[in-house]
């Protein structure tokens, strides 16, 4: 108003141009302020937009990687333990491959915690992959023949029998292998074990089963596990049923050679004359347990947890077949560990690993199983693969050479293997499938994996963290691939033909190996397709 007044009073033109100038300047200032505000907002919007695009891109990328195979979407709804169990019953009876559960179905809800859900859940997922791998993995490897021929040559005695060879074999034992990869003297060592003079026989200390500790001329010691069963006898009941199978100990040694897991003590088959080779050199306590049965067969029952006069093992007249397992040298002090995947050995009580799918997390929280601290967890996964093939569900403890870094889990005691050629216990593979899954501390990332396909932004961060977990040793995997196309049984048969108690396994057991290997392939596929092969396979520098 004052400006208008000014204009009315005098110098209208000046006043007018002054007014014009003022309004122009004000406009300019306003425009500048407006421009400045606009550019700030624009920048803000732009950065927000870029951020969202970035997040979406990363999100899509992970969702794509994690979910690359839409056909393999996992169960969309969580199922109650009861439902899972019921479906398994149908599934077991319709499937060619049996999944055995130690625990029977129960109506009482209070007992549901004892149903082996964790193993069951995985088994059902793996079954889907099993159906799809019929063509994949069906081609025999071109490398197979040369590998079998090489091992077969090693198994031929190349020099004469001598107990000095047993001292040579002692030198083979290292932190990670009991037998080296190149081992031309192996056949001669095995031959020596099968014929060397026994100078002492006693009850073997340790363990619960009947076995003898024998000493050869020259001082080398070995365990003798006698034959209890005929080759074609089928052991019914839970996976750990029955007595030790001597042929299983022999077969496990040869299979370990094939798989490059040379961690089984050197084992040869031997027929022993109880009256001339054992009784004259037996300790007093052992000798007391020798008897002759009604058919004039020489028998003995020894002293051990399960030993009793009513349960003696008998030869055919004086001859008894058995597995001779060379003792590791005295300087190898074994360290004894309880297996995290130990069974309860009670049908109505499940172990934690049988009910908790996240069990591997619990295992990894123990520092000896941390991948950064050494090969132990991957060794247990190797053991699971090996045990699944031989159907050994009895690895309640394991041993490693002490005082050496990076020492391997040894596969000592394979006596409870090869019990039932028509059953597969998928839960023996638990260390493999429980430790390769995407299980993260947040829990809800796991929920994504279990229940559907949606991916949450927060998952990206957890995923990045979780990717450091999963694993199967690359070397083991490559070795398993050598036997694609159903060739494992025949390969083992060829090596076992060199044994002194051939045939060591019936064709049913040999065929079971091919079937079980397919389950391992399917389990690995389950891991690969969920996380990508590079995330699952690991070269930790050990083999
Ligand atoms: N080749 C070997 N070299 C050194 N020690 C061995 C060898 N074989 C077995 N042992 C030792 O003897 C123990 C008993 O052997 P093994 O496990 O074969 O017997 P077992 O009666 O079947 O045992 P368990 O009842 O615990 O299953 C092993 O835990 C190990 O400490
Ligand atoms: Mn045992």
Image (cartoon, rainbow, N blue to C red):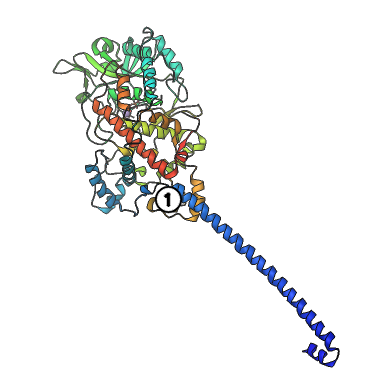
Name the spot of residue 391 as percent of width and height, x first: 30, 32
Ligand 1 is found in the corner quadrant, namely: top left
Estimate the x, y position of residue 309 in percent, counting from the top left.
21, 23
The percent coordinates of residue 475 (x first, y second) are: 44, 30
> Which residue is labeled 1 in the image?
446
Most foreground residue, 105 or 535: 535
Residue 70 vertical placement versus 340 (above, below): below
Residue at horizontal 40%, vertical 28%? 479
Outermost residue toward the top? 160
Instruction: In the displayed orientation, state which residue is furthest to the bottom.
Output: 9
Q: Single out the residue that lies furthest toward the left.
A: 294
Please give left or right for residue 415 compared with residue 53 in the image: left
Provide residue 379's location: percent of width, then percent of height: 43, 32
The residue at the far right in this view is: 11
Q: Which image quadrant is residue 132 in? A: top left
The number of callouts visible is 1
Task: Identify which residue, 7 or 115, lies in the foreground.
Answer: 7
Circle 1 SS class: helix
What residue is at 42 percent from the left and 48 percent from the top? Answer: 67
* Residue 394 seen by the camera: no
Residue at 53% in and 55% down: 55
Q: Is residue 370 above or below residue 108?
A: above
**Is any part of residue 473 visible from this angle?**
yes
């Amino acid at each position: 108003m004052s400006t208008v007044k000014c204009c009315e009073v005098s110098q209208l033109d000046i006043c007018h141009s002054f007014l014009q100038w003022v309004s122009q300047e004000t406009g300019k200032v306003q425009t500048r302020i407006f421009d400045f505000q606009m550019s700030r907002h624009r920048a803000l919007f732009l950065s927000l937009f870029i951020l969202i695009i970035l997040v979406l891109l990363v999100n899509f990328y992970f969702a794509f990687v994690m979910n690359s195979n839409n056909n393999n979407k996992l169960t969309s709804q969580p199922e109650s333990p009861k439902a899972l169990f019921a479906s398994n019953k149908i599934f077991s009876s319709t499937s060619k491959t049996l999944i055995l559960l130690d625990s029977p179905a129960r109506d009482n809800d209070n007992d549901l915690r004892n149903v082996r859900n964790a193993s069951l859940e995985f088994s059902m997922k793996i079954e889907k992959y099993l159906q799809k791998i019929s063509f994949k993995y069906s081609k025999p490897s071109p490398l197979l023949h040369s590998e079998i021929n090489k091992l077969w040559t090693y198994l031929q005695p190349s020099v004469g029998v001598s107990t000095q060879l047993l001292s040579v074999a002692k030198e083979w034992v290292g932190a990670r292998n009991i037998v080296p990869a190149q081992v031309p003297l192996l056949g001669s060592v095995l031959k020596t074990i099968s014929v060397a003079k026994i100078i002492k026989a006693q009850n073997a200390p340790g363990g619960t089963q009947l076995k003898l500790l024998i000493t050869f001329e020259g001082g080398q010691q070995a365990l003798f596990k006698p034959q209890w069963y005929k080759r074609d006898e089928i052991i019914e009941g839970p996976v750990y049923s029955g007595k030790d199978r001597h042929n299983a100990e022999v077969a496990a040694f040869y299979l370990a050679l094939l798989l490059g897991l040379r961690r089984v003590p050197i084992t040869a088959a031997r027929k022993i004359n109880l009256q001339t080779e054992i009784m004259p050199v037996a300790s007093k306590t052992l000798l007391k347990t020798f008897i002759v049965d009604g058919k004039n067969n020489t028998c003995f029952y020894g002293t051990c947890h399960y030993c009793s006069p009513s349960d003696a093992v008998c030869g055919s007249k004086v001859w008894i077949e058995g597995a001779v397992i060379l003792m590791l040298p005295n300087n190898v002090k074994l360290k004894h560990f309880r297996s995290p995947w130990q069974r309860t050995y009670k049908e109505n009580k499940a172990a934690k690993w049988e009910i908790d799918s996240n069990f591997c997390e619990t295992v990894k929280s123990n520092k000896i199983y941390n991948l950064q601290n050494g090969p132990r967890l991957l060794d247990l996964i190797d053991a699971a693969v090996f045990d699944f093939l031989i159907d050994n569900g009895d690895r309640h403890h394991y041993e490693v050479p002490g005082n050496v870094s990076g020492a391997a889990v040894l596969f000592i005691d394979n006596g409870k293997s090869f019990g039932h050629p028509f059953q597969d216990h998928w839960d023996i593979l638990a260390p493999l499938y429980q430790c390769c899954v995407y299980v993260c501390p947040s829990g809800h990332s796991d929920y994504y994996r279990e229940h559907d396909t949606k991916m949450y932004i927060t998952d990206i961060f957890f995923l990045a963290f979780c990717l450091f977990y999963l694993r199967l040793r690359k070397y083991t995997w490559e070795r398993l691939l050598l036997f694609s196309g159903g060739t494992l049984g025949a390969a083992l048969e060829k090596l076992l033909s060199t044994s002194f108690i051939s045939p060591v396994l019936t064709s049913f057991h040999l065929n079971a190996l091919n079937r079980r290997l397919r389950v391992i392939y399917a389990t690995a596929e389950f891991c690969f397709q969920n996380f990508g092969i590079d995330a699952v396979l690991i070269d930790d520098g050990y083999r």
